[in-house]
Image (cartoon, rainbow, N blue to C red):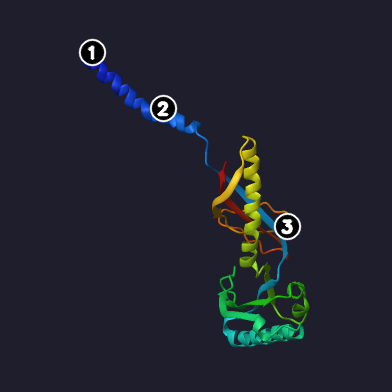
Amino acid sequence: MNNRTASILALGLILASAPMAWAFYASRLPQNTLEATGSARVKVVSDVAKWHGSIYRTVAETNLKQGYAQLRADLQALKDYLKAAGLPEAALELQPVNMEQVYQQNPSAPREQTLRQGFTVTSPDTAKITALGLDQTLMDQGVQLTTYSLEYYVSRLPEMRVELLGAAVKDARRRAQEIAGSDGRGVGPLQSARIGVVQVLAPNSVEVSGSGAYDTSTVDKEVMVTVRAEFAVR
């Protein structure tokens, strides 16, 4: 190997190793920013309740007219029941009546249809909606009624999200200070923040979701917000 060839090979090795050497050097440089995740959680009481259910009648296919008449009577009983409880007419939302054929094991049995009308009752009085949804008065009167669910919501969620963000950033700063302090450094101004989704959870629940959780089964809830913040370090 002549001197010219050896020089070219040596230069190639230097150029090839230069990026690795720079990466190693850069990893030893002090970082100017630090990221930390913070969260804030507050207990709240739901201020909106929804009662989902349906009234229904099962009649012979040849007697649908009477079935619709019975369903209208049941609906009026439901309206009277809500009025007596002090709820306005606007609290009741009705769905169209649908007809479902009843499965018969005996093919020669008379064909039957179930006429069903779904409804939702909404009110800020969560205790009243809970009591109405669990009460048996209408069924004692002969109304055929099914309750699907009682759901509870928080109407101030957008405002609460804003209020919790400040507390979440403070929590992130505290965590960043703990990390930076272990290396003898301090945390400076906030550089950027990425806000996570809002989690509305049952009390003491840890069942969060990446797309956001919203538990509707409990009146008492906990609202949690997370934020990933980037701080300057010095």
Q: Is residue 147 above or below residue 210?
A: below
The picture quadrant where one finds residue 220 is bottom right
Q: Residues within 10 Å of mark 3 (few under 14, many from 20)?
A: some
Q: Which residue is mark 2?
A: 21
On the picture, is 130 further left or further right than 101? right
Residues 111 and 145: in front is 145
Q: Tag 3's secondary structure? A: loop
Q: Residues within 10 Å of mark 2 (few under 14, many from 20)?
A: few
Residue reaching furthest to the top? 1
Say which mark, if any, is on residue 3.
Answer: 1
Residue at (71, 68) in percent of width and height: 46
Q: Amino acid at mark 2?
A: Ala
Q: Tag 2's secondary structure? A: helix
Q: Which residue is mark 3?
A: 203
Residue at (50, 31) in percent of width and height: 28
Tell me which numbered mark, 3 or 1, is placed earlier along the sequence.
1
Distance from Cα at disc 2 to Cα at disc 3: 53 Å
Residue 188 visible here: yes
- Quarter of the image with the N terminus is top left
Residue 177 drawn at (x, y percent): 64, 43
Q: Amino acid at mark 3?
A: Pro
Q: Are marks 3 and 1 in contact (CB under 8 Å)?
A: no
